[in-house]
Every structure is written in structure tokens, then in C-alpha cells.
Image: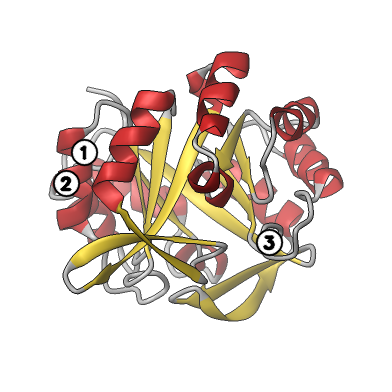
Amino acid sequence: MLCKRIIPCLDIKDGRTVKGVNFVNLRDAGDPVELAQQYAEEGADELVFLDISATEQRRKTLVELVEKVARAIDIPFTVGGGISTVEDVHLLLQHGADKVSVNSAAVKRPELIDEIALTFGSQCLVVAIDAKQIDKQWKVHLVGGKVPTEIDLFEWAKTVEERGAGEILFTSMDHDGTKNGFANAALAQLSESRQIPIIASGGAGNISHFSATFIHGKADAALAASVFHFGKIPIHKLKAALKDNQIPVRL
């Protein structure tokens, strides 16, 4: 069985790491380079860097900061935010990213998924999906969760897999920052219906939430931010607990 992955997420705004609740009320969480280095040393399996205001501000991801983070770590590194062309991807890969994450631009122009997968390979493409429940249906949201759509989460996941995505990063906006656990029912439905890995995001508050998303949500990886940024859950302690729970992890 493949090891389950633990992935800290650095949400970047104006060059700093931030964290909020339900995608709003952001507060400063520290220097991204220092945090990245700390997580790599603590045993994180991968790192995700999301420039959360890049799409809204219609600018490109902070390439210089990406390069600084890449130099500080020796684990796989995914970068997202403001990516809308194959050229954007090439630039980020040149500056140290191992994978890229696309979200709003892919919804607006799904051909972008095909183009990136064909040019660089599916293994370096993560499609991020932000969704929340509206009238008991999961609906995709764009631009950092600010723009609702009528697109169904599960239909969109099917489309991105068919177009060549290597992984799906699903963030439940309803669970984000609440520390009440992941959206495991939706995650299990995604995992059972798709062949590519599913990364759970949104809701981590304690170690049992990680166990639950691997067991009940059937996620391949779990991403979290504030519980790591503010020292509530040390990564080495989390992994030891998961191993004690018979969940395969890399120690």
C-alpha cells in the first residue's frame, strides 16, 4: 500500500504566510521560507505554496519567493496561484517547483489542463478544486472561493482526470479553518469515483481528523495549514500516531 502523505500548505499573500477561516479573516502566520524549511526538517512529505491573491489581483505567482523556498527544502514542492498558460508553468518549474496547481484558470479554460499535461506530464499537474455545499450540492467556487459557479464538484473532478490531471486537491470551503475535521463523505465519493490521487484539504484540527480522512475519507494525502503554522500538531508526532493507527506513512 502506498504511504499516505502529510502536506503543509503555505497560503501566501503579499509575500507572507496567512491563514483564515472559510477563506476569509486572514491573519499572518509567518515567513514562508522559514516555515518551508521547518516543515521539511520535521518530516513533511511535500509542500504546497498557494499565492492566494494572484488570480484576484490578475498577476503572476511570486517567482522570486518560489525560488527561495525551493532552495530551502528537499521535498516535492507544488506551486499555485495565477497560473494560466504553459509559459507560466515552465517559468515555475525552472525556478524550483516540482508540480503546479491550477484552479480558476482551468475552470475558465479546461484546455489548459490538456496543454500542461501534454507538455510537462500529468505527474506535475495538480488541479485544485474549492467547493462548498449549496442546497446539499457541492458547487465549485473560483478566485479564492469568492466566485460561485453552477459546476458540480464530482462532474468537474471527472473532467479534470479525463483531461490529464495527475492529482486533485479538494478543499471544502465549509470546513476550511474550522478545525472540525475534513469533508470525509465528499472525499470518499471522490476517491471511489476517480483513479488519480485525492488530496484532502480544509478542516484539520487534531490528529484524529487526519486518521479519519485516511480511513473514512479514503484520501491519499492530507493538507493542512494553521495546525502546523501555529504549532498545534508537530508533524513527527502526527506521523507516529498515524503509524500506531496502522496507517502507512513515511517516517
- Looking at the image, residue 107 sits to the left or right of residue 133; the answer is right
Secondary structure beneath disc 1? helix
For this orientation, the residue located farthest to the bottom is 25
Residue 45 seen anywhere in this rendered image of the structure? no
Vertical order, 171 against 79 (above or below): below
Q: Which residue type carries mark 2?
A: Ala
Cα–Cα span, label 2 and label 3: 29 Å
Q: Which residue is mark 1?
A: 191
Q: Which residue is mark 3?
A: 12
Cα–Cα span, label 2 and label 1: 5 Å
Residues at discs 2 and 1 in contact (Cβ within 8 Å): yes
Secondary structure beneath disc 3? strand
Asked where in the image residue 155 lies, by quadrant, the reply is top left
- Looking at the image, residue 208 sits to the left or right of residue 18; the answer is left
**Residue appearing at x 29%, y 35% in the figure:** 158
Q: In the rendered structure, which disc, 1 or 3, sits on the residue that comes first in sequence?
A: 3
Vertical order, 34 against 169 (above or below): below
- Looking at the image, residue 188 sits to the left or right of residue 209; the answer is left
Q: Position of residue 116 (x, y in %)?
A: 59, 25
Residue 83 seen anywhere in this rendered image of the structure? yes
Q: Which residue type carries mark 3?
A: Ile
- Label 3 CA crowd tier, 10 Å (few <14, some 14–19, many 20+): many
Q: In the rendered structure, which disc, 2 or 3, sits on the residue that comes first in sequence?
A: 3
Badge number at residue 188:
2
**Residue appearing at x 45%, y 70% in the figure:** 232
Secondary structure beneath disc 2? helix
Q: Position of residue 104 (x, y in %)?
A: 54, 51
Q: Position of residue 176 (x, y in %)?
A: 40, 69
Which quadrant, please, contains the N terminus? top left
Vertical order, 113 against 131 (above or below): above
Cα–Cα span, label 1 and label 3: 28 Å
Residues at discs 2 and 3 in contact (Cβ within 8 Å): no
